[in-house]
Image: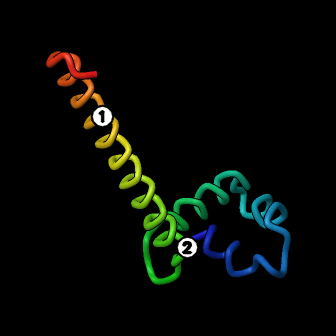
Amino acid sequence: MRYALIEQRRGTWPIVVQCRVLQVSASGYRHHRLLQATDIGPNQPHRLLSDAALAVHIKAGFARMKNDLTFSVVRTFSTLRGIN
């Protein structure tokens, strides 16, 4: 409830002053805002984009890992068969 009040009056009063008056810590308020920003919802489209970017990085990592593994298997097989 206090954090919602601070959020409503954010443009009117400095956050630090509001936190002092409402007897909450500014770091607690910032942490609360950070937790809200990480929830996926219609008001956080940036979160969806970062999830998509993360998926691209994960897929690229798996592709590199697959290529490295394929190369290692072929090299080992070639060494065992005496092919260089």
Q: Residue 15, how many percent across, how many down?
A: 79, 66
User: What residue occupies the far front of the structure in this picture?
Assistant: 83
Q: Amino acid at mark 2?
A: His
Contact (Cβ within 8 Å) of mark 2 with mark 1: no
State left or right for residue 2 relative to residue 74: right
> Which residue is rendered at x = 34% and y = 49% of the image?
63
Circle 1 is placed at which residue position?
A: 71
Q: Amino acid at mark 1?
A: Phe
State left or right for residue 32 relative to residue 58: right
Mark 2: few/some/many CA within 10 Å (<14, 14-19, 20+): some
Q: Residue 72, how many percent across, how many down?
A: 28, 28
Q: Residue 18, how many percent across, how many down?
A: 78, 67
> Which residue is rendered at x = 59% and y = 60% of the image?
34
Q: Is residue 70 above or below residue 7?
A: above
> Which residue is rendered at x = 53% and y = 60% of the image?
35
Mark 1: few/some/many CA within 10 Å (<14, 14-19, 20+): few
The answer for how far apart the CA atoms under marks 2 and 1 are is 38 Å
Which image quadrant is residue 32 in? bottom right
> Which residue is rendered at x = 39% and y = 52% of the image?
58
Mark carried by residue 46: 2
Mark carried by residue 44: none
The disc, 2 or 1, on the residue closer to the chain's N-terminal end is 2
Instruction: Give SS at disc 1.
Output: helix
